[in-house]
Every structure is written in structure tokens, then in C-alpha cells.
Amino acid sequence: MGFRSPANLSDDFIPSDSETFEIKISLSERLTKLAEINAQVQELECQRQALLDERSALSSDIQKLRGFISLTRRGQIPDDILREIFFRCLPTNHDAIMHSREPPVLLTRICAGWRQLALSTPRLWASIHLPIPSLPHAPTPALHGAPYALTPTDIASLPQEQFFELSAAMTRRAEGVKEWLLRSMDCPTSVTIISRDYNGFNPFCVLMLNAILPFRSRWEKMTIVSMKPHLAPLRGLSASELPLLRKFEYDEVPSDPNVPEDDLQGFDVLDFLSTSSLRKLSVKRVRENISCLPVQWASLSSLTLHLNFQPNDMTAMIGLLQQCLHLKTCSIVVQRYGGDNFPFPVSNSSIQYSAIPVTLQYLETFVITVRGESNYPAAFDSLIMPNLRHLEFQWACYPGTPLRSLLAHSGQTLRVLNTSASGCSDDDFIAALRHCPHVTHFHGPLHGALVPAPLPEYRTPIDITDQFLELMSTPDEHGQILLPEVEFFDCLSNMVSFTDEALIKFIRKKQAGVVLGLSKLKEISIRFSRPQLKPIAELLKPYIEDGLIVKLSYLEPFSKNTLPSAYAFAESPSIYFSSEPMPPSELY
């Protein structure tokens, strides 16, 4: 490499003949040196890969050796503690699933010791979730009325190979269900059966119900989602056969509207619902007169009714609640799910409404959702809930809304209010809110899913304006503040029309702590149906550093450059402000 380094030569250098010869010699020397270096690099890379492989093997061996001397492997964790750990592995929002990758089945596949312990722990097998597969084709009309099994004609119309393969698999599963529940010994059981086959009668749903019937004396919680004919195995059960039943949920899957009502064998003939142990009842989308169910209404602590009808009169509903003296939680949804004009299911009830006020002494949570045209009677004004803590009120009907009368009777004890009322003026809405001064969680008008567009004149949506925020942060001429104790403020709807300036002013006043009785905010969540018009990140920064959580959603941020990365994510129209940033996936 006798020639000068190329780094010392200018770009316009033109070599002479002798210099060209020297360059070729230097180039050859450099190529030889490069080949030697490449060989060394290759050798070192091979050594590195060998070391990595050795490290991986050692790590695997170490993990296995540690497993051999672990407390669980050596049995040094007492069985009762390990059983409790197993129990904490079960799902909390649904019953256990029959799947090898889900507990408790997964716990039986770790080692022999765990398998033996899991199989001998009854609590692990005391719940089961059973989804029912749909039939391999749309059944013939004859299937709708089949009480237990398909007729030969019906079976002949099915895809034979698919149906019998599925039938064999479901028969094996039914046997597995029996074995599963046998492991639960004497534990009270919780069972969920879901069949959303809208095409007609599904024999596999009945098969599963028959599989769990031998364990009915231990049923504590039962959830069924299916068509009404699938309930056939439950008809004829007496209350004495289900002494432990505390919770029953039924969500009816719509059946063929051409099937006569008499052929559906009504839900109201389930005599076992009269058991004195029943405390929680949930009934959704049924046609029957709910008040005729053989339920000991006075024993219920929780009642959920989602009714597939348009009410012409709420009086009968109040009459039903009048029987539920010990309710703590009540949820009522009334709307039309289909096109049929069925009568309101608690109308023409033997329970007659009295002018005497209906007092639900123990009710703490009340959810009422009414969609559609309704004749709002004065009877609703008589509902008194002296210990109400949580109210969700969604009213998308006319004329008027009972929100004001409800809050006048029961607003003083409220802590959580979630409301939307399209038949209520802004003034009436504000007047209603003045009856609940101790609300700490206020969820403003929800997205206009309840409200049709365009709106008729009588169905004006509530609008959260600058004036509304002013009323919530500034005393009026009488020294009163609207919802002064609110700490969590949500408005996630298209009913938000206040400005960014009003929002900043509202937060500033709430967080100042100078107005007596005005609580500071802990979290505020707003969804705007407009772009962001003003950069507000720096204005909010002091409050965020003091612990306030701010969640804002705009159609479009003002500018990505105005949002400090430590406080916000501006990659999407949703913007989240907090002292600890959230991942973008958790934004609204």
C-alpha cells in the first residue's frame, strides 16, 4: 500500500501513467487485506453464534433445574394455598370455559401434581360456560315447534355428514359437562348456556340443558340465551328442586314470528322461579306479561328487565316495582326491537297501581332507559328512592320526561348520575340537576344513539354549553352552584357545544379551591364533534402535574407541535393529557 491514501487526494485528481500503475498495486493490496478482515469477521461471527447457542442451552437447562427445586414442584407450597391460587386464575367476568388453554383445564396440563390437585378441588369446577354451535343449515319450518328432537323428515333435510359429525361432537361434550360438574362435588354451581341460532330450534341447546339437569339441586346462578322452545327441559321443575338458585338470567333470542304464540310454550310457566332463594332476576326481550311470572318479588334484591315493547302506560311498571320491597339494584329498558306491535308486557296486570307513593327503601342503583313514543303518566312521579346512590336515566320519548320529578324525590342522596333526556328543555334539565347537590360522578348526555335525526321539535336534545359550565363553577345570585361536588365529569357525546376557552375557565375555577363547597376535579373526559380551535396543553399542564386527568377527543387536533410529548399523544384525533402518558391504544 505504497500509494498515498485516497483521503489525501482531491476529487479532481487525474493520475499519470506511473501513478495509475501504483494505484493498481495499492488497490490489489487493499483487496487482499479486506479479504483477510472479512474472514476474521466471519470467524468471529461463528464464534458469537456458538456462544449464543450455548447461552440459550444453558438458560434452558437453568430454567428446568430451577423448576425441579421450585416450591410448587417440591410441594413446599401447602395445598390449600395452591388451591386458592388456582381459584384466583378462574375468569371473573364469565363462567369457566371448556378449553385446554383456559383454566381450570389448563391447570391440569402443567404437571402430574397440579393435575391431581386441580381435579380434586371442587371449587374449580363449579362454573361452566356452554356456547351452542348453530345448525349447519337453515332448518325447515317444522323445526320451530320441535319440543325435544328433530323429526325424521327434518333430519333428512339436513346435510347428513356435517350434522352427524356435529351431533357426535356435542354428545361427547355433553358427557364432558356431566364429568365436569361431578368434580364440583357439593359446591353451588353457575352455568351459562348461549344459543344464538336464529334459524330455528337447535337440539344441541336442549342436549346441554338435559346434561346439567341432574345437578339442578346445586344450581346457584343460571344464565340462558336462547329461543323459547329450548326451555322445554326446565318446564315442570318445581321450586323445591332448585333450593340454592339465587340468580336467574334469561335473554330470549327472537323466534319465527309466524309460529303461533301457543306453540312457544311461554316463559311464564317456569314454576321453579317461585323458589324463595331467588334474589337476582334478569329477563330480556320476552313477550309474556312479566308480572305474571311466579316470582316472589318481595325477595328480589336485583331486577333487570329489557322489554321488547313500546309502553303505552308506565303505571303497570310502577305497580310491579311496588311489589319489590327489597330491591337494591333495578335496571329497566323498554324499546321496540322488532316491527311487531305487541302490547306492553306488564299491561293488563292483576297488580293495580295505587296513588300511594311507591317507596323503594333499599334501592341504591336505578337504571331506566325508555325509547319511543310513550304516554308518561303522573304515576312515575310517585316513585321515591330515599337511599338512591346511582342513577342512569336515558329517556328518548315524548311528551316530557320524569327526570325532574325523580330527582326531586330522590336526588339528595345521589353520588353518580348518568343522564340523557331528549324531551327535556335546557332549563328543565338544569332545574332537575339542582335537586342533586352531592353528585360526585356526572356523566352528561350520551351520544345521540337514543335520539333520531333529524329531531322533531318536541324532542330537543340537551346541549352542554358555556353557560352550563359557568353554572357548575360560579355561584349565581342566590349563591348556588350547579353540581358543586362533581369530581368526575364526562361528556362523551355530540351534545357538547362549549368552547375551549370555556373549558379552560371551568377547570381553572374548579381547581382554584377558593369557592366554599366547590370540589376540585379529579378527572374530566370530553368528546367534541368539532376540531380543536385553541392550543390548550400548556394551559392545562399545571393542573395535570397536580394530578388532574384530562381526556379530550376532537375531530382534529389544533397542532401536533403545540402538544408536549410528556403530556399528550397527537397522532390521532383523540388527545389524552395526564401526568403519566397513556399508550395511544388506550385513547378514546
Image (cartoon, grey):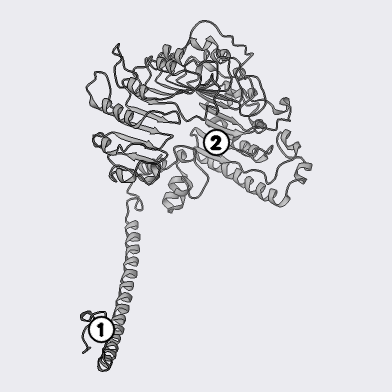
Q: In the figure, is residue 450 to the left or right of 576?
A: right
* Percent x, y of residue 51: 30, 71
Q: Locate the C terminus and report the quarter of the image it occupies.
A: top left
Q: Residue at x 53, y 45 (%)?
A: 98
Quarter-of-image position of residue 314:
top right
Quarter-of-image position of residue 14:
bottom left
Image marks 2 and 1: residues in contact by CB distance under 8 Å: no
Q: Residue at x 47, y 39 (%)?
A: 122
Q: Residues within 10 Å of mark 1 (few under 14, many from 20)?
A: few
**Given the image, on which type of amino acid does mark 2 rest?**
Thr
Residue bearing mark 2: 192
**Given the image, on which type of amino acid does mark 1 rest?**
Phe
Question: Which of the two marks, 2 or 1, is nearer to us in this view?
Answer: 1
Disc 2 versus disc 1: distance between alpha carbons?
86 Å
Front residue of 236/444: it is 444
Circle nearer the N terminus (2, 1): 1
Q: Which mark is residue 13?
A: 1
Front residue of 207/142: it is 142
In this view, 46 is above or below 514? below
* Percent x, y of residue 446: 46, 28
Front residue of 158/542: it is 542
* Percent x, y of residue 129: 53, 39
In this view, 579 is above or below 68? above
Q: Secondary structure at mark 2?
A: strand
